Image (tube, rainbow, N blue to C red):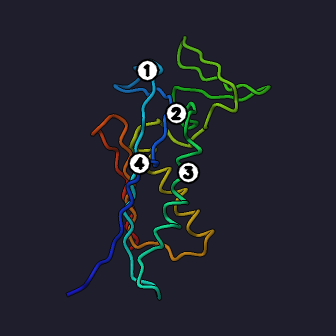
């Protein structure tokens, strides 16, 4: 028999509003639109000397900084096969076929992913969270689940298990 400990965090403030567009069905590009995204995390691991899986405050603060960095921004994928993204003179230009969008550089978050889906946003947030926890010298979790809700009940989920 083995025991597993885990904590979950879901706070009213772990929300960000952002714009994006994705492609689907090959090369169909949806219109630019926005969501009020909600983020929650679940962390599993052994108990530390304080009998915590992880300090809730450290987890909350780390996740909040990541979420705040996405709030009120245009989310653009930099590894998309048919959407090109470039930066020049304080502007970011995104192109897909005949369509072209230009945004102020400070209003954009360029994300190293193929599409700005809820699933890939969850993975990106999870990676940043792991980096932040490591910078705080916290033990890495044995399991991390990040969930991103883009539309009141439509969750993209990423899970990492350390074997």
Farthest-out residue, right: 89
Q: Earlier in the sequence, mark 3 or mark 4?
A: 4
Residue 45 position in % (x across, y down): 39, 76
Residue 80's label in the rendered image is: 2
Residue 26, how many percent across, how many down?
38, 25
Residue named by callout 1: 29
Q: Quadrant of residue 138?
A: bottom right
Residue 95 lies, with reference to residue 60, above or below; the image says: above
| Mark 1 vs mark 2, CA separation in Å | 12 Å
Q: Residue at x 55, y 11 (%)?
A: 98
Of tags 4 and 1, which is closer to the observer? 4
Crowdedness near tag 2: few (<14), some (14–19) or many (≥20) residues, C-alpha within 10 Å: some
The residue labelled by disc 3 is 66
Q: How packed is label 1: few (under 14 Cα within 10 Å), some, or many (20 or more)?
A: some
Mark-to-mark CA distance, 4 and 1: 31 Å
Q: Which residue is mark 4?
A: 12
Disc 3 or disc 4, which is closer to the eye?
4
Q: Is residue 118 above or below residue 122?
A: above
* Label 4: few (<14), some (14–19) or many (≥20) C-alpha neighbours in 10 Å: few
State how far apart marks 3 and 4 are (Cα).
Answer: 15 Å
The answer to which of marks 1 and 3 sits earlier in the sequence is 1
| Residue 33 left/right relative to 90 | left
Q: CA distance from mark 1 to mark 3?
A: 27 Å
């Amino acid at each position: 028999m083995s025991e597993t400990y885990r904590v979950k965090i879901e706070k009213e403030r772990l929300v960000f509003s952002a714009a994006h567009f994705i492609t689907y069905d090959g090369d169909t590009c949806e219109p630019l639109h926005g969501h009020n995204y909600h983020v929650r995390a679940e962390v599993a691991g052994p108990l530390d000397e304080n009998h915590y899986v992880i300090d809730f405050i450290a987890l909350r603060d780390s996740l909040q900084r990541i979420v705040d960095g996405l709030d009120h921004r245009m989310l653009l994928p930099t590894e998309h096969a048919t959407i090109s993204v470039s930066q020049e003179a304080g502007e970011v230009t995104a192109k897909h076929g005949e369509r072209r969008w230009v945004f102020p550089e400070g209003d954009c978050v360029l994300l190293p992913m193929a599409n700005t889906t809820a699933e890939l946003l969850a993975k990106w947030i999870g990676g940043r969270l792991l980096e932040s926890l490591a910078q705080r010298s916290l033990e890495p979790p044995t399991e991390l689940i990040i969930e991103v809700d883009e539309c009141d009940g439509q969750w993209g989920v990423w899970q990492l298990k350390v074997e």
